[in-house]
Image (cartoon, rainbow, N blue to C red):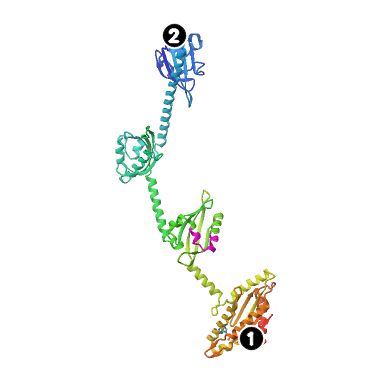
Amino acid sequence: MGIRAILLTTGADKLQRIRSAQGPLDPEAFAEGLLELPPGLPCEELLEVPDILEQPRLRQHDLARAWPELRYLAAHSLTDPRTGLAGMLWLLHDRPHRLDEEARLGFRDFAGLAAGMLADRLELQRVRDSEERMALAIAGSGTGIWDRNARTGEIHYSSDWKALLGYSEHEVGNRIEESYTRVHPDDLAYVQATIQAHFEGRTDAYEVEHRLRCRDGRYKWVCSRGKVVARDETGQPLRMVGTTTDVTAMHALSEKMQQTAALMTDLTNEIPGMVFQYRRQLDGRAAFTYVSSGVREIYGLTPDQLVQDAELLHGILHPDDLALYLGSLESSARDLRPWHLEYRVQLPGSGLSWRQGAARPRPLADGSVLWHGFITDITERKLIEAELQVFATTDSLTQLANRRHFMTQLESELARVQRSQDYGAAILMFDLDHFKSINDRWGHSVGDEALRHFSAILRAQLRRTDAAGRMGGEEFAVVLSNASLDEARTFAERVQRELAGAPVTHGDERLPLAVSAGIATLHPDDPSAEAALSRSDMALYRAKRGGRNRIECH
Ligand SMILES: Nc1nc2c(ncn2[C@@H]2O[C@H](COP(=O)(O)OP(=O)(O)OP(=O)(O)O)[C@@H](O)[C@H]2O)c(=O)[nH]1
């Protein structure tokens, strides 16, 4: 090109830094190595000034001052496709000059090459800067960094890495073989296999927790993370970088938590019944996240079975209680109120049994609800309750309803009559005739036998909807649902016939047992069951007065 000097400057604006100069131009002549762009630059990609003497403004420029012989100047901007202007390439001469077309094209190509190299260097600088920033960011954070040449097996550690294990700067070798000697023997195979899988491209990056021996011989738990950052054309790793973080404290904590969890499990397994944690998601899906071993007795399942499939309970709960069970959990989740329920289960091989559930719900951030609670077996309590219920409502001699329970049944029947105009019911009072003389003649136990005998006759005549009770002594009452006065009279006649036809005997003797009956219907305007009862009582009184073994209606 017939040029005396070449200059390379970098910068993104009018102030350029001189990077290199070839020829008689002295870079030292520029203040702080900076050069301000002459006016008109770098607006154009290529600018040529054939003779500076013809450009008065350029004669005063720094370039002309640094090299007074300067007569010719050509400049080409160097651009970085990512950031724009990155520098300038200058051609200078001490004589007037002009590039011919071929030289211009050559200058353009040359500037293109220089711009590419400059962009690469800037990129490298950026990477270095960011690496430095990263190193600064993780300095003192309990993390060290390393850089491994996968081909030669050379590995370099940051000062933090060495400090992590208690080494000073020059106490750690740079061979990978040595690095593996610091890994705990029990962890080595696993660590190497993890790294190998990453080398073979089976993972994007790797992360492995293991123990590393410190300078003082003790082991620390660390988390090693690594990633291959360069591979050759066949995919073989060339360079891998990574970090090592001290997780000893976290490990100790997680071990402590595991011990606590194991203790909790042991304790919950000792509690009779089943301790559970149950989670219900916003979309309604639900699962047991923990169940104690008591699930075997409570539901006849293993903990794993119930944790894997909560719906197994649908086949275990009594069909009549399933909807109640699901509904009660639903409302507990909705209102965040404690869940309490008594329900029946049917376990294979054993009969019906009762369970009681109690749990507290807690809302979670994702909208789901988490219960903690327990289920106990209350079958025995339910049996006792049922026995007490029978005890409280039944006459022990005859097994008929006692007076109090019969009155409750009568009240329900009256309510039914009051609800429906087409519905009628009758109340009958029975009283054994001359019962005192039976006791007097054959004794109390024969009298008891006679009372049981009459109760059995009454019971045999009842329909499922009717009810009978012993009102006291030798007095009985029956309420016939959906029955008229005539139907009630027929009922009483049948009872008298049965009693006459099946007498109680004592030895060869036959007890002269007969019964009087008084009948009344229930009225919708009866203020109470007692009112209807007293009408039938009045009718009974008339039957007694009328000669006994009679039926009177009110
Ligand atoms: N064996 C027995 N007798 C009872 C029981 N409860 C009451 N009695 C007796 O039943 C008798 C009832 O007698 P009364 O009230 O005089 O009536 P009655 O002899 O049946 O005469 P009328 O009812 O007028 O026909 C009494 O002797 C009571 O002691 C009982 O549980 N067992």
User: What quarter of the picture does the C terminus occupy?
Assistant: bottom right
Q: Is mark 1 within 8 Å of ligand 1?
A: no
Tell me: 95 left or right of 522: left
Residue 441 position within the rendered picture, expressed as x and y whole percent measured from the top left? 55, 90
Q: Ligand 1 shows up in which quadrant of the image?
A: bottom right
- Tell me if residue 111 comes above or below residue 200 in the rendering: above
- Give yes or no for residue 322 being in the magenta stretch: yes
Q: 137 or 9: nearer the eye? A: 9
Residue at 53% across, 91% down: 508
Q: Earlier in the sequence, mark 1 or mark 2?
A: 2
Work out whether residue 62 can be spotted.
no
Q: Residues within 10 Å of mark 1 (few under 14, many from 20)?
A: some
Magenta range is: 312-325
Q: Quadrant of residue 435?
A: bottom right
Characterize the magenta stretch by its predominant secondary structure: helix
Q: Quadrant of residue 442?
A: bottom right
Tell me: 536 left or right of 59: right
Work out whether residue 522 can be spotted.
yes
Residue 238 position within the rendered picture, expressed as x and y whole percent measured from the top left? 36, 33
Q: Is mark 2 within 8 Å of ligand 1?
A: no
Q: 484 or 118: nearer the eye? A: 484
Measure the C-alpha gap from mark 1 to mark 2.
157 Å
Q: Which mark is residue 175?
A: none
**Looking at the picture, which amino acid does disc 2 mark?**
Arg
Q: Nearer the viewer, mark 1 or mark 2?
A: 1
Q: Which residue is mark 2?
A: 95
Residue 119 position within the rendered picture, expressed as x and y whole percent measured from the top left? 44, 25
Secondary structure beneath disc 2? loop
Q: Which residue is mark 1?
A: 549
